[in-house]
Image (cartoon, rainbow, N blue to C red):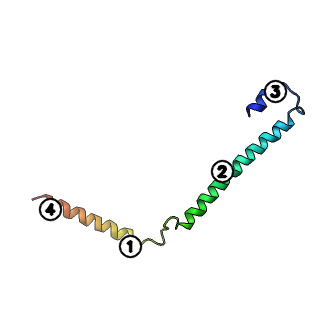
């Protein structure tokens, strides 16, 4: 980028080679970043990856049952504190 800004007094055709070199460097950098991310993703999946919600043990209680259990637990705590 600095190469392009430094040659602002030159005509458009004089520095076209530098523009192409700069463009190749940018594309090469992006390709390198993509390759590193692809390798990391492949290694992550090979080592098992993240546990999904399907593999976890699910409790069959509904929200209403869990809420009523929590309310009952809270009431028991209140009763035990009123000695």
Please, what secondary structure does the residue beneath circle 2 have?
A: helix
Of labels 3 and 4, earlier in sequence is 3
How far from the left and from the top, in percent, is residue 12? 88, 32
Crowd tier of the residue under label 2, counting other residues whose Cα lies within 10 Å: few below 14, some 14–19, many 20 or above:
few
User: Whole-Å distance between the Cαs marked 2 and 4?
Assistant: 61 Å
Q: Distance between the Cα atoms at labels 3 and 1? A: 68 Å
Q: Which residue is mark 2?
A: 33
Residue 80 numbered mark, or none: 4
Q: Which residue position holds label 1? A: 59
CA–CA distance between discs 2 and 3? Answer: 30 Å
Q: Earlier in the sequence, mark 2 or mark 3?
A: 3
Which numbered disc flags the more N-terminal residue, 3 or 1?
3
- Mark 3–mark 4 distance (CA, rounded to whole Å): 82 Å
Residue underneath mark 3: 8
Residue at 70 percent across and 48 percent down: it is: 30
Q: Secondary structure at mark 4?
A: helix
Foreground: disc 4 or disc 1: 1
Task: Determine whether, in the image, residue 3 is placed left or right of residue 68.
Answer: right
Question: Mark 4, residues whose alpha carbon is within 10 Å: few (<14), some, or many (≥20)?
Answer: few
Q: Is residue 59 above or below residue 31?
A: below
**Pair 2/3: label in front:** 2
Which of discs 1 and 2 lies nearer the camera? The answer is 2
| Residue extending furthest toward the top | 9
Name the one closer to the observer, 62 or 9: 9
Question: Counting other residues with Cα less than 10 Å from the Cα at mark 3, is it few (<14), some (14-19), or many (20 or more)?
Answer: few
Task: Say which element carries label 1.
Answer: loop
Q: Please name the residue shown 14% across and 58% down the image.
A: 81
Disc 1 to disc 2, how far (Cα)? 42 Å
The image position of residue 66, as x and y in percent, is: 34, 68
């Amino acid at each position: 980028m600095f190469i392009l800004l430094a040659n602002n007094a030159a005509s458009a055709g004089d520095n076209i080679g530098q523009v192409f070199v700069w463009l190749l460097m940018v594309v090469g950098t992006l390709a390198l970043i993509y390759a590193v991310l692809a390798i990391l993703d492949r290694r992550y999946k090979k080592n098992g990856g993240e546990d999904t919600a399907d593999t976890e043990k699910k409790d069959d209680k509904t929200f209403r049952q869990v809420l009523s259990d929590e309310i009952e637990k809270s009431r028991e705590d209140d009763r035990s504190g009123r000695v």
